[in-house]
Image (cartoon, grey):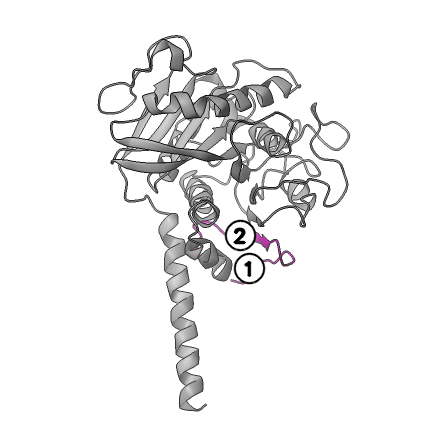
């Protein structure tokens, strides 16, 4: 090997290390302190941690109760609307929200319902109404000096909320703001193939979902497996992450990726402590990989990397995950990008 070849090899190695370090950083808590607030649709909001409560006026109350996570430091930050899973509460994701917000994002998480049937139409419309409220109302729910960049908005959701997020991206409700990015976390479209909840999103046809925003689909390897012989899987094969990604129209989406955490379950990105009967069900019904922190760090970090690339124009962390997926805090069984076939990362 001559000197020039050795130098190129050394530089390539350094580049891989640099990309790996960029990827690793998003999986850790970011540099921002985080303010977590509740904003009620009918009464003055109360602060969950530190500082005075936000006090929006009557004309700025949101259409649904909200949990808002925001950086505490003065500045302008992009907004991500997060839609919770079926029959759970938005506060079950508070640790995930704080992770993402610590990297410089404002998370707006509506409580779409308390009890709901199979039809998601009302949830889709409610989520669209929350997005419409952001330009006029969100500023009153933020810490002093914190501003929301609301020329565009990103949307994310878990489980049934992931389906609702896809529905918004597909135009099932008119949005007041253009979508900057879509992040679907283990999305689910019903109980199984042929048993989708209305309105069905998946069509059974490859590349049939024309999403014009960049789309990330995160999956759980254990979500397709039942917790026990008498329980259905929480993310059934054929109506979960692989189907959503497989039906994305590659020609319409400006960018897309699909990451699957091999050894973790459908609710493993939730808080360590999810109180009450609903919280107990998140552990009793879905198969789990054990401790939730690694999956939560992975989901939060992957979302930050994707948003950094498509909202802020900084692709370093996303490129790092692509180049060195082993840097993630969980083992990935699938790392798939728009321009290539699915691959299983090497050990």
Total label count? 2
Percent coordinates x, y for residue 88 in the rendering: 50, 22
Label 2 to label 1: alpha-carbon separation = 7 Å
Image vertical order of residue 56 relative to residue 145, above or below: above
- Crowd class of label 2 (few under 14; some 14 to 19; many from 20; radius 10 Å): many
Give the quarter of the image for residue 117.
top right
**Dominant secondary-structure state across the stretch colored magenta:** loop
Seen from the viewer's position, the closer of residues 28 and 207 is 207
Q: Residue at x 59, y 54 (%)?
A: 337
Image vertical order of residue 179 relative to residue 66, above or below: below
Mark 1: which secondary structure?
loop
Of the numbered discs 2 and 1, the one sitting upstream in the chain is: 2
Q: Is residue 191 left or right of residue 53?
A: right
For the N terminus, the quadrant is: bottom left
Q: Which residues are magenta?
A: 326-347
Is residue 275 at least partly visible in the picture?
no
Image vertical order of residue 281 relative to residue 25, above or below: above
Mark 2: which secondary structure?
strand
Give the quarter of the image for residue 209.
top right
Percent coordinates x, y for residue 118 in the rendering: 66, 19
Which disc is residue 313 wearing? Answer: none
Seen from the viewer's position, the closer of residues 153 and 335 is 153
Which disc is residue 345 wearing? Answer: 1
Q: Residue at x 58, y 20 (%)?
A: 125
Q: Is residue 22 left or right of residue 241?
A: left
Give the quarter of the image for residue 298.
top left
Determine which residue is flagged by label 2: 332
The answer to whether marks 2 and 1 mark residues whose Cβ atoms lie closer than 8 Å is yes
């Amino acid at each position: 090997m001559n000197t020039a070849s050795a130098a190129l090899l050394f530089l390539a190695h350094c580049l891989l290390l640099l990309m790996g370090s960029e990827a690793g950083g998003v999986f850790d808590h970011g540099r921002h302190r985080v303010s977590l607030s509740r904003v009620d649709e009918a009464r003055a909001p109360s602060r969950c941690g530190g500082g005075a409560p936000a006090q929006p006026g009557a004309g700025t109350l949101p259409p649904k109760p909200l949990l808002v996570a925001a950086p505490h430091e003065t500045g302008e930050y992009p907004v991500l609307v997060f839609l919770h899973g079926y029959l759970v509460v938005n506060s079950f994701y508070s640790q995930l929200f704080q992770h993402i917000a610590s990297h410089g994002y404002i998370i707006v998480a509506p409580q779409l319902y308390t009890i709901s049937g199979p039809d998601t139409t009302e949830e889709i419309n409610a989520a669209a109404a929350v997005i419409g409220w952001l330009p006029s109302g969100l500023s009153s729910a933020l810490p002093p000096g914190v501003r929301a960049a609301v020329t565009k908005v990103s949307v994310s959701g878990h489980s049934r909320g992931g389906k609702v997020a896809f529905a918004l991206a597909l135009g099932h409700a008119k949005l007041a703001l253009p979508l900057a990015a879509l992040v679907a976390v283990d999305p689910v479209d019903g109980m199984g193939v042929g048993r989708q909840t209305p309105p069905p999103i998946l069509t059974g046809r490859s590349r049939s979902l024309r999403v014009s925003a960049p789309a990330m689909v995160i999956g759980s390897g254990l979500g397709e497996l039942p917790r026990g012989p008498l329980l259905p899987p929480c993310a059934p094969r054929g109506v979960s992450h692989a189907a959503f990604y497989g039906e994305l129209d590659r020609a319409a989406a400006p960018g897309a990726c699909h990451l699957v955490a091999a050894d973790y379950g459908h609710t493993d990105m939730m808080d360590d402590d999810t109180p009450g009967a609903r919280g107990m069900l998140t552990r009793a019904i879905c198969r789990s990989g054990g401790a939730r922190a690694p999956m939560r760090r992975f989901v939060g970090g992957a979302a930050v990397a994707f948003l950094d690339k498509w909202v802020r124009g900084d692709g370093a962390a996303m490129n790092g995950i692509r180049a060195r997926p082993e840097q993630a805090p969980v083992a990935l069984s699938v790392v798939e990008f728009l321009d290539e076939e699915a691959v299983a990362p090497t050990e």
